[in-house]
Image (cartoon, rainbow, N blue to C red):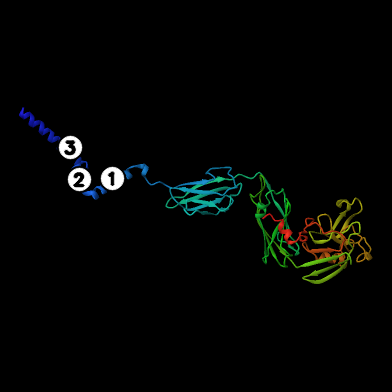
Amino acid sequence: MGVSHISNRSQRQSHRWSRRGLLGALGVAPAAAVLTACSGSAGASEGTEGAAEASATSTPSAAAKKPVVSVTPADGTRKAGFSSPVEVTVSDGTLASVKVTGNDGSTLAGSLDAARTRWTSVRNPYSGTKYTVTATPEGAAAQTASFTTRSPGETFVGYFTPEAGSTSGVGMPVSINFTHAVKDRAAVQKAITVTAEPAVEVVGHWFDDTRLDFRPETYWAAGTKITLSLRLKDVEGTDGVYGVQQKDVTFHIGREQISTVDLSSKEMTVRRAGRTVATYPVSGGNAQHTTWSGIMVISERFRQTRMESSTVGLGDEYDISDVPHAQRLTTSGTFVHGNYWAATSVFGHQNTSHGCVGLHDAKGAGDASVDGYRFYASSMLGDVVIVKNSGERTVDPANGLNGWNLSWADWKAGSAV
């Protein structure tokens, strides 16, 4: 029995020591050793912190997260809208840079918010364009995305006067006629600017929903350079109808020539830079067909042209195939032109026309000695012709390029911005 007791105790002791040896071999201190080695509250805290660090290192959910970039429109979109800015955001990080490039070579500039987690383009993307977005988070590799904007359905353009690169007289407005009626006049006008060198205030005026003209308060100064900037691409002029033009064009103003036709004295006085350079006897509209009064601008010029009374509502009163030196003053058919079929004695003495202003001329438009030829040779598009004492009311400002008949206040009242 005693031997058996000693044997059992020895076995228990051997088992206890072998467990300690196993723990030591595994590098894990037994509880008693931990307490002996790390006494006091500070030691206990350090031990807890070390355990927490070990736990954080060994737990995947607590690992450092990588920044994730999101793009609007979403990556891979094939028919994205083009009426909102492009937006790039990042989670679990900040943005170092963003670049947005179109397949047409254009780029979209943008700006970051204060937290550098959101980038927004300063303008909308263009329609019908594929864009590549390259976003680089701080301390991480660049991430890319791409999308393609849809093409607009119906479109409109604006046809402008004068022609690009041309030189005109001081009365020439910048006149734009749109191919589709404009509902959102403010949006369209904001997309068009007209600037002048030397600088002067230039304001737009809507005559109707398809015509927008620009002019300063008084005639342009001689030698002015005018720049028309069209930024109409993707501007919604009316529901579902978008502009397509994105261009700059320039015009120039030549010398100042202003001619005044007095149909009481039946004389036209031509002045350049304030100095009289010529005086011509004329014949204006008769009592039944009076000539419009007011300020008019030469909008078309023809060395010879056909004039038919039926085109201006006068039946078959005349049809002249070779009217010489004709210069248009109104859309409705008022011209200042040469006249070879009336007696020379008419000019300066009688008003006999159907509303035009006539000067003595020769058939064939080749005689440089006659008044019609000389006035035509001295003129250009955009020159001002003022008619007074005609017995007729002032011409409608929309009848031709004749907005100068509106006061500056009335002109500005027709602006949409």
The CA span between labels 3 and 1 is 24 Å
Report x, y in % for residue 118: 49, 50
Q: Point out residue 201 in the picture as x, y percentages from the top left corner.
A: 68, 63
Query: What is the secondary structure assignment of the residue under circle 3?
Result: helix
The span from disc 2 to disc 1 (Cα, nearest Å) is 15 Å
Earlier residue among tags 3 and 2:
3
Is the C-beta separation of discs 2 and 1 under 8 Å?
no
For mark 2, give the secondary structure: helix
The residue labelled by disc 1 is 51
Is residue 200 placed above or below 126 in the rendered structure?
below
Which amino acid type corresponds to the residue marked 1 in the rendered image? Ala
User: In the rendered view, does 252 fall on the left or right side of 260?
Assistant: left
- Residue nearest the observer in this picture, 240 or 101: 240
* Image position of 137 (left or right of 167): left
Q: Quadrant of the C terminus?
A: bottom right
Identify residue type, mark 2. Answer: Leu
The percent position of residue 57, horizontal first and vertical second, equals: 32, 45
Q: Sort mark 1 into few (<14), some (14-19) or many (20+) by Cα contacts within 10 Å.
A: few
Q: Earlier in the sequence, mark 3 or mark 1?
A: 3
Label 3: which residue? Answer: 19
Residue 162 percent location from the top left of the image: 73, 59
Query: Disc 2 vs disc 1: which is toward the camera?
Result: 2
Q: Which residue is mark 2?
A: 35
Q: Is residue 105 visible?
A: no
Kind of residue at badge 3: Arg
* 344 vs 408, nearest the viewer: 408
Whether tag 3 and tag 1 are in contact, CB under 8 A, the answer is no
Asked if residue 222 lies left or right of residue 391, the reply is left
Quadrant housing residue 341: bottom right
Q: Residue most toward the top?
A: 1
The quarter of the displayed image where residue 5 is located = top left
